[in-house]
Amino acid sequence: MKCLSLLLLLLVLTNVAALAQTTATLTGVVTDAKTGQPLPFANVYLNNSSRGTLTDEHGRYRLTVPT
């Protein structure tokens, strides 16, 4: 019985780990195509999703997305 309980617990924990969502972080700098200067407070978004962010005052952004 103890072995069966341990096996059941192992199966449950394995399934929980499989359902855990992993993420990736995209980072970069948005610059003007002509001048090369950073663009502060520009919108950055992932196509076909509602995920997005703004660049900071130096044109840098960080966007965490599910993989």
Image (spheres, rainbow, N blue to C red):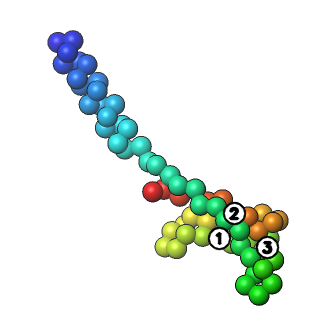
Where is residue 20? Give x, y as percent.
42, 43
Cβ–Cβ under 8 Å for marks 3 and 2: no
Q: Is residue 54 visible?
A: no
Q: Which residue is mark 1?
A: 44
Sequence-wise first label, 3 or 2: 3
Q: Amino acid at mark 3?
A: Pro
Residue positioned most to the top: 2
| Of 27 and 50, the residue lying toward us | 27
**In this view of the protein, can residue 10 be seen by the observer?**
yes
Mark 2 → mark 1, Cα distance in angstroms: 8 Å
Distance of label 3 from label 1 (alpha carbons): 13 Å
Badge 1 marks a residue whose secondary structure is strand
Taking depth in this image into account, of 4 and 34 the one nearest to the observer is 34
| Residue depth check, mark 2 versus mark 1: number of the one nearer the observer | 2
* Disc 2, SS: strand
Disc 2 + disc 1, Cβ < 8 Å: yes
User: What label sits on residue 38 in the rendered view?
Assistant: 3
x, y percentage for residue 66?
Answer: 48, 56
Q: Depth check: give the residue in front, 60 or 36.
A: 36
Q: Quadrant of residue 40?
A: bottom right
> Label 2, on which residue?
61
Mark 2 vs 1, N-terminal side? 1
23 on left or right of 44: left
